[in-house]
Amino acid sequence: MKKFVFATLMCIAAMSAKAQVITSEAVKNAYETASTQPKSDFVFNADYTDSTLTTMYIYKKNETGKDFQTLTPFKKYEYAYAADGTLTSKVTYQWDADIHRWNCASRHDYTLEAGKYSVVYSIYNAKTNKFEQPVDKMVYSLDPYTDTSNVKIYHRNNSTSPLQVVSEIQLTEEPLLFAEK
């Protein structure tokens, strides 16, 4: 569920920026913000195709001496986009130090249909070599006539149970109110 929270935060960030979908530019900006943090325990690197970020690598800093540190691979994210630059999927890999290999862990799939933006979270099953049924889903919709956003979050306990609504949030853009002292 922790991993799905990140997807939720990305969608809420997109909503607060008046965007309906996450784009390649938003992914690139998130990478640039993360990679320029001065006091971080992580180092970031990325691969690009043209100017589009396609893979982000995260390395953990290991302090080994006074002025010496090593980097250990930690996570890798692979991004795929539609022709218009909207994010369609993000696959997460975790580093296995014992076998020195990236292991697939999960996938977020992003879709925009009928004015609703959905994020679906699936876990990778190494035994079957495929992604399981989605565990979590978030649907964001905006009513253009009222400036009201609706976010529904779904979860399933196992692959045979249906996705069920666990949370629903309705956001209304209201004017800021200021009070005099």
Image (spheres, rainbow, N blue to C red):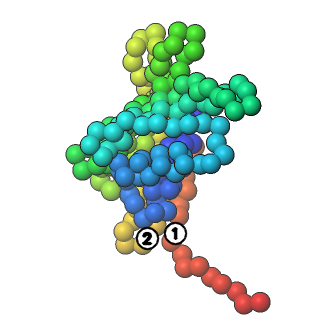
- Which residue does the numbered mark 2 point to in the structure image? 147
Asked if 63 appears above or below 24 in the picture, the reply is above
Marks 1,2: beta carbons within 8 A: yes
- Residue lying furthest bottom in this view? 180
Dividing the picture into quadrants, the one containing residue 19 is bottom left
* Residue at 37% across, 52% down: 25
Crowding near the residue tagged with mark 1, few <14, some 14–19, many ≥20 C-alpha atoms within 10 Å: few
* Residue at 43% across, 70% down: 147
* Residue at 42% across, 65% down: 18
Whether residue 154 is visible, yes or no, is no
Foreground pick, 62 / 85: 62
Asked if 129 appears above or below 79 in the picture, the reply is above
Asked if 49 appears above or below 167 in the picture, the reply is above
Q: Which x, y percent locates residue 75?
A: 52, 29
- Residue lying furthest right in this view? 181
**Which quadrant is the C terminus positioned in?**
bottom right
Q: Which mark is residue 172?
A: 1
Q: Of the residues shown, which amino acid type is indicated by label 2?
A: Asp
Q: Which mark is residue 18?
A: none
**Which quadrant is the N terminus positioned in?**
top right
